[in-house]
Image (cartoon, rainbow, N blue to C red):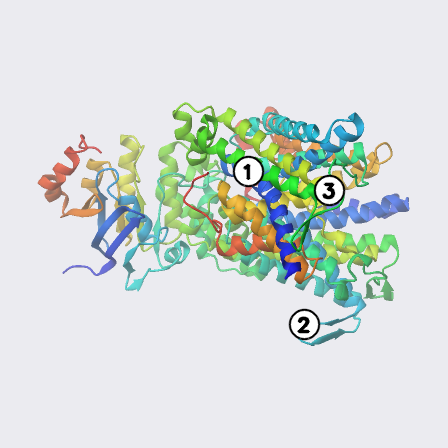
Amino acid sequence: MKRLLPLLWVLVIATVPLWLRDQYFLHVTITTAIFIIAAMSLNLLLGYTGQLSLGHVAFFGIGAYASALTTLGFNVELPGGLSIVHTPWPAVAGFVIGVIVAGLSGYAIGKLSFKVRGAYFVIVTISFAEVTRLVALNWVELTQGPLALTNIPPYTLWIPGIGEYEFWNKTAYYYLVAVIGLLAYVIIKRLVNSRIGRAMVALKENESLASSVGIDVTRYLVLAAVVSAAMAGAAGSLYAHYVKIIDPDIFLFIYTVTMVIMVITGGKGTLAGPIVGGVIFGFMPVIVRSFAAPAVQWILYGALMIVIVFVLPQGIVPAIERWASSWRRSRVGNDAVVLAGSKVREE
Amino acid sequence: MDELLQHVVNAVILGSTYALLGIGLTLIFGIMRVVNFTHGELYALGAYAVFFLEVSLGVNFFLALVIAVIVGCAVGAAIEFVLLRPLLDADIDTTMLVMIGAWIVMQNTELLYWGGVSKAVMTPFPEEPLQIGPVFVSWLRLFVLVMALVLIGATYVLINWTKLGKAMRATFQDRDTAALMGVNIKGIYTATFAIGSGLAAAAGALLGPVFLVTPSMGDLASLKAFAIVILGGLGNITGATLGGFILAFVEEIGAGYISSGYRDAMGFLIIIIVLLFKPTGLFARAERIG
Amino acid sequence: MQADIVLSIEHVAVHFGGLIAIFDLNFDVREGEIVGLIGPNGAGKTTAFNVITGFLRPTSGNVRYRSTSLSGLKPHEIAKLGLVRTFQRTSVFQNNSVFQNVLIGLHDRGRSTLWDTLLALPREGRSEQELVQDAHEILQLVGLEQRASELAGTLPYGEQRLLGIALALAAKPSMLLLDEPVSGMNASETARCMKLVEKIRGSGVTILLVEHDMPMVMQVSDRIVVLNYGRIIAEGPPAAIQNDPEVIRAYLGQGKKRA
């Protein structure tokens, strides 16, 4: 049964466009899925490695801008008279560049930010994101500033049997995002279930103890930051080539908060957490907007966040696991469940 | 040269209110170790309170200022009591998330009630500025400077010469020992949060008429407050005061001579640079407040 | 024929502002020895420990491990050289299972790289299998095999300390530093731990331990080093130390034989 479940999920995901006919809902599904990828990447840093990075949207935005600029081309003059001209490249190249640039900024910011811990780390990460936003806003020559980068072309892939295919159509884009999302999930799953994942969990719990057995704490923190940033950059690129217009508002702190809410309410440090949280907070606006103004929505989110912290501090997924485990216990008996439960934790 | 002098004067005035913001946060952050994301919202609340009292209730400007500060203290105490006290020994992530939630709720409540359009606060001061030598200062700004300095002085007195201040300093140095000596830690936390929030509200009330009042005015204020706290060292009031002036100077000079667009980035750059090279702050003395 | 010196502490001094925690520490540990570091509370034992394992930078002096200077090295680098310590408080990863704890300790023995993991290459699977095997062996050695799937934080205190040693053993030390290994243990747990310490030495690991439990330390150690007020006041075999007037004075000054 356990083996069948993932397959079932893949099937469900694969068939969504067949029964979700409403284009608007399909749109929401796509943007939600993109945000879920970003949330999964944040979960690696926040949930598994235990670093409350509140600047994550910076990587999302950097990925988006890098991808868009690669595809649109740009012409900037640097101080000193040096001029850089870039001619447009295919959108797929933009995706790759977006991932790489985001990953590199993850490395740079990680290396710098991890010199401090705790509250100071939080503040430094927020600051990096804000500086990025202000650069995007003010370096008009490169980013068009508040005028936004527009007419971002969609991806074109060569698909065997079809030839060159442009990803305009929502259904096609949905499948693209679903595939990348699945890939992201697998990457995270493999990472956290490995020796590397164990090192991250160890340093999350006790850095001194971890280093006493030879774990290079900084190295793994930076690794988590790089993978996390690269993945967020991928999500950013997907976003840019879907909505086809991006402006510096993409760097607003509120988007980081959205991702954080998704991860925390879903369950940080679990694989399913960001997905559950993402689905809830991705679709909630759609449901709520019919009877409440945006400001009210946000009041609800804020209140929900507070409530979750008090009532379900571990998030929804662990709560469900606990409930399922106690239900099993009442039917099968305690010892069997403890053994089975511990296997789950070792996954 | 005249231009420079003008910038200096502007910086001094701005710096005094920044100092209020910073002192409030350094007390909260220092004594309670809470990453207080609502600090900027109390700043905004102070401004909105003055606006509301003046425009909707016809209250005199000066009285409105006083009431705004009291409201700030009260709201701060309420936040601490309802949200933070139950989480007294939770880890920093948890309290941070709760503060973010509170920040979202507060800001959007303001947005809901007053809308996103910026509001102007009327003051009884004359419009034409005073001219002192080559420099122009508006009466309003002069008033702001004086009030801010008065409040900074009052806080200094509170922390260093009252029983409450002593208890706060003790809690800052060593919470457990202070508790053993009979200090009511929970009470001190509520008082600290109330005082810090009151100072933020005061800064907002004073600056509201100078700039405009918008729901998002608190965001930058929060971050700048953190920059000041980090610059001055946690729990260090003198450091926060100096930090406030330094930030204002950097902003003014930077905006005046480099680029005004990046003005707000100055605060963040300061945070980044200081945290990376001198995490204890420029003025850190070993664990003392006052 | 004396064994080689593996650890040498040379003129180590630690000043905290005006407070001098360690004056001028000089001693060696030889291959295969079990050396006990004792002294009244506040004598500087934990400080010395922290200096040796890289958790504290000495104000002056140097520590050498097998002729490699440990000056400026980070704790994980020192651990990789073979010098591994246990902790007295929070000695294990509370929120992980006993088995996971040992797996974490085995971290450096893993052979796979990031790409092996991401691409699920065969080397990853093989490496993991080896580690699982090693983990079982270590748990058997310390006698915690039946507790494997339990959460470390739920273990009785004595067994947590044993797990802490297992964790350190997983890191394949050539020298083990035990920080008060039997503190808080009852008589049978202490006996169990002492047997384990002998077994570990038997497998070729040199041991330096800090302890307050006098009978335990006297029985288990080949040699004792006594610290008081940041200085060594005596050094020698247990029998000599027990009768040393300086040592007795230092402890009587504290009021109890078991400090």
Q: Which class describes the residues within 10 Å of circle 3: few (<14), some (14-19), or many (20+)?
A: some
Q: Amino acid at mark 3?
A: Ser
Tell me the number on the disc at residue B152.
1
Q: Tell me if B141 is positioned left or right of C27 in this view.
A: right
For the N terminus of chain C, the image quarter is bottom left
Closest to the observer, A259 or C220: A259
Eye-nearest disc, 1 or 2: 1
SS category of the residue bearing label 1:
helix
Please tell me which residue is depicted at 42% across the width and 26% down the height of the picture: B179
Q: Which residue is mark 3?
A: B216
Dividing the image into 4 quarters, which one contains the C terminus of chain C? top left
**Residue toward you, C9 or C143:** C9
Instruction: Please give the chain letter of the residue carrying mark 1.
Output: B
Q: Is residue B256 above or below residue B157?
A: below
Marks 2/3 in contact by CB < 8 Å: the verdict is no
Identify residue type, mark 1.
Ile
Q: CA distance from mark 1 to mark 3?
A: 25 Å
Whether residue A232 is situated above or below residue B215 in the rendered picture: below
**Residue B143, percent across and down?**
65, 39
